[in-house]
Amino acid sequence: MPFSISKDEILETVSMLQTENLDIRTITMGISIQDCRMSDGETTGTKIYDKICRYACKLVAVGEEITREYGIPIINKRLSVTPVAIVANGLNRDEMVMVGKYMDKAADEVGVNFIGGFSALVHKGFSSGDLALVEAIPETLGTTERVCSSINVGTTRAGINMDAVLAMGEIVKKTAARSADRDGLGCAKLVVFCNAVEDNPFMAGAFHGVGEPECTLNIGVSGPGVVLHAVKKHPDLELGELANVIKKTAFKVTRTGELVGRVASRKLGVPFGIVDLSLAPTPAIGDSVADILEAMGLENVGAHGTTACLAMLNDAVKKGGAMASSYVGGLSGAFIPVSEDQGFINAAACGAISLDKLEAMTCVCSVGLDMIAIPGDTSAAIIAAIIADEAAIGMINRKTTAVRIIPVPGKKEGDWVEFGGLLGRAPIIKVNQNSPARFVNRKGRIPAPIHSLNN
């Protein structure tokens, strides 16, 4: 059946665009670079650069054309590639850095703002390529503008690779130090996953999985402002009926994403992949997931009841969005990036929300601990333990979880950091200083839970 959209839906969408901050957060082209492995970093990087430029040369222009034709803002145009540790396995650390620089050069050439895929999947152990890539992360993220990196340290089926968790605690610290002149901004381009997915269009975690086609287009919708507007219209509705309101709203938002994806796919001659129907906030007023939770009845996000509100919101968004698209994928839920959401910024500033409460909320949200600024002197062992806790939530609950945390050099609890743009600003929040060093230094692998044996 051909995709169609009614006049009433168009009129509703116009209202969402004009008054409720509806946008397409990202259109992300995934490109397989599995055929780009050459004998050294220079020739591998050159081949990756050439392939990216060939496939993505029209991506930005098509996105701008769709915005003009349909009046739908497409905020970001991005790229993802096959995890570099797989493609460049056998190259050394310096050659991995060189590949990263060619990726950055290609992203600049085609005009996208980020490129994901400087990634490794190490949930059961390291290959030589994985080790080289992990060691290359601080320099790569510190010397490039657009390259994003992700490391998967655990899955429900495999358990958690604690050697990798411990290593990533050190890498986060080194990455922050490498970009200390920019308040550790390199860490905003680094995410550590459990149960990473292959078709995520959102940064910094996007990579083009090995099960994906040669090239595909994935769409990331947004719409916290639209959901907030709908919730505010019903201040006294009982929760079951409010969930239906959110579902209907998510349906409309996702239909817009489906439309953009189909049109872009046709114009670029690239297969349409998925719509990720996540609620992705920005620092703009009225574009906040935290504000939705407060509109549901909380005095401040972080109050008791926050996790229940978020669980209901996340579930309703998934149910409504799943009916609106042929292919829903990616992460699909509600993001809670502290520095990128004005409501969470306010809650963190007044002490209404803590790192512990944010961790509890990740049990029911889309991803995990995201864009959280912590004191620069936080030890690598504590950061590793934060990663381990979040990975455990993902492993046990069969969901994707992640950590994108920024130990800001020279900053202490109560200070502020300004990242700018969509990355926003945030207060430095308190971290429990009781040491987990003996635990994380045991290394090894936390075994998979018994419910992983479900064949």
Image (tube, rainbow, N blue to C red):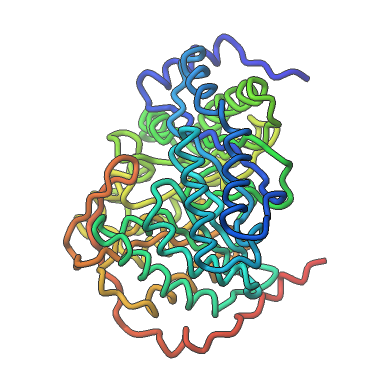
Residue at (72%, 49%) from the top-left corner? Answer: 35
**Residue 89 visible within the image:** yes
Q: Is residue 320 visible?
A: no
- Residue lying at the far top in this picture: please name it: 7
| As drawn, 237 above or below 307 | above
Residue in the image at 59% along x and 74% along y? 160
**Image location of residue 440, percent across then percent down:** 47, 83
In the image, farthest residue toward the right: 455
Figure check: 91 above or below 319: below
Q: Name the spot of residue 363 as percent of width and height, x first.
A: 50, 61
Q: Which is more toward the observer, 393 or 391?
A: 391
Q: Nearer the viewer, residue 267 or 449?
A: 267
Location of the N terminus by quadrant is top right
Query: Taking 356 as reference, is 318 above or below it?
Result: above
Judge left or right: residue 219 versus residue 21.
Answer: right
Number of numbered markers: 0
Front position in the image: 188 or 70: 188
Q: Position of residue 187 (x, y in %)?
A: 38, 59
Q: Residue furthest left?
A: 415
Residue 452 horizontal side relative to residue 302, left or right: right
Q: Position of residue 408 (x, y in %)?
A: 26, 63
Say which quadrant the C terminus sits in. bottom right
Q: Quadrant of residue 159?
A: bottom right
The residue depicted at 42 percent of the width and 29 percent of the height is 226
Which residue shows up at 69% across the image and 36% down it?
Answer: 327
Image position of 168 (left or right of 132) = left
Indicate the quadrant where residue 286 lies.
Answer: top left
